Amino acid sequence: MAPLFSCEFDMDTVCIELKFADGSMISIDCTAVEDEIAKNMYQRSELDYLVYNDPVGYANLILNGDPEKYVINVTDYIPLD
């Protein structure tokens, strides 16, 4: 794979767009990822934080990591029951 040229969040499409030096592009639909992975608002919030503050880290997590395990480990959800 060619070196990464740019990575940014596009608010119009709600996607993280990765552009590579050879002209190829990957677009990650953040809404679809949240719908599939996040089970509560705390997990959604953690994914949103990455989208806005570390889009490269978000893309790396989705493409190479285990996002379900990540959101479970970084969020504390304690029901009020």
Image (cartoon, rainbow, N blue to C red):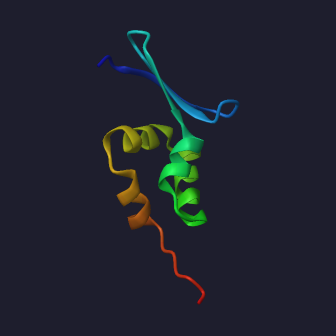
Relative to 16, residue 65 above or below: below
Residue depicted at 51% across the width and 57% down the height? 38
User: Residue farthest to the bottom?
Assistant: 81
Residue 62 is situated, as x and y percent measured from the top left of the image, at: 40, 42
Residue depicted at 53% across the width and 58% down the height? 46
- How many dots with numbers? 0
Residue depicted at 42% across the width and 43% down the height? 57
User: Residue farthest to the right?
Assistant: 12
Residue 51 is situated, as x and y percent measured from the top left of the image, at: 55, 44
Relative to 66, residue 81 above or below: below
User: Residue farthest to the left?
Assistant: 1
Quarter occupied by residue 12: top right
The one of 75 and 8 positioned closer to us in this rendering: 75
Asked if residue 37 lies left or right of residue 10, the reply is: left
Quarter occupied by residue 71: bottom left
Relative to 40, residue 64 above or below: above
Residue 37 is situated, as x and y percent measured from the top left of the image, at: 47, 53
Residue 34 is situated, as x and y percent measured from the top left of the image, at: 54, 50
User: Residue farthest to the top?
Assistant: 22
Locate the N terminus by quadrant: top left
The one of 27 and 57 positioned closer to us in this rendering: 27
Relative to 53, residue 11 above or below: above
Locate the C terminus by quadrant: bottom right
